[in-house]
Image (cartoon, rainbow, N blue to C red):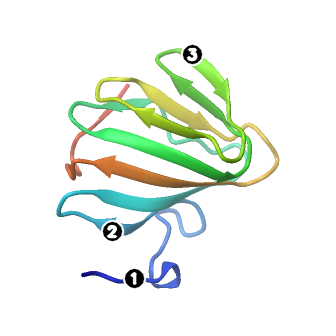
Amino acid sequence: MQKVNEKEKEFRKGDSGPKYMFRGPNVDWGILVLKPRESIKLHYHAKVEETFYFVEGTPKMIVNDKEYRVKEGDAFRIEPGEKHDLINDTEQPVRAIIIKYPYLPDDKVSC
């Protein structure tokens, strides 16, 4: 069993980016915050499936060159090999839960 509290973890960029609650041994599970005009940058994973569940904000999700306007409550499951980006082109922050499986921290490939 493992227990954490969000206040014990830090965002990668201080007040935005991913904040991983659990890292391995089987899954990455975290919270993603994007401030206005931030993005995760176009990338894909060779073997990792990535899921996004949006709890706040309406960013633009791009998957294999197709654009989607996110609504709160939307979930996206991105298969290995699917190029994706998340762009906060709004004036409001974005908050999402992210899950990556399996745990392969070096599986990200930038485009």
User: Which of 97/108 is in front?
Assistant: 97
**Residue 30 placement: quadrant:** bottom left
Question: Which residue does the numbered mark 2 point to in the structure image?
Answer: 22
Mark 1 closeness class: few <14, some 14–19, many ≥20 residues within 10 Å: few
Q: Are marks 2 and 1 in contact (CB under 8 Å)?
A: yes
Of the residues under marks 2 and 1, which one precedes in the sequence?
1
**Residue 89 placement: quadrant:** top right
Give coordinates of residue 87: x percent, y percent.
Answer: 63, 36
Q: Residue at x 51, y 42 (%)?
A: 40
Q: Are marks 1 and 3 in contact (CB under 8 Å)?
A: no
Of the residues under marks 1 and 3, which one precedes in the sequence?
1
Q: Amino acid at mark 2?
A: Phe
- 92 sits to left or right of 47: right
Q: Residue at x 79, y 51 (%)?
A: 92
Q: Amino acid at mark 1?
A: Val
Mark 3 closeness class: few <14, some 14–19, many ≥20 residues within 10 Å: few
Question: Which residue does the numbered mark 3 point to in the structure image?
Answer: 66
Farthest right residue in view: 91
Q: Quadrant of the N terminus?
A: bottom left
Mark 2 closeness class: few <14, some 14–19, many ≥20 residues within 10 Å: some
Question: Which residue does the numbered mark 1 point to in the structure image?
Answer: 4
- 46 sits to left or right of 97: left
- 103 sits to left or right of 43: left
Secondary structure at numbered mark 2: strand
Give coordinates of residue 47: x percent, y percent.
Answer: 21, 34
Q: CA distance from mark 1 to mark 3?
A: 36 Å
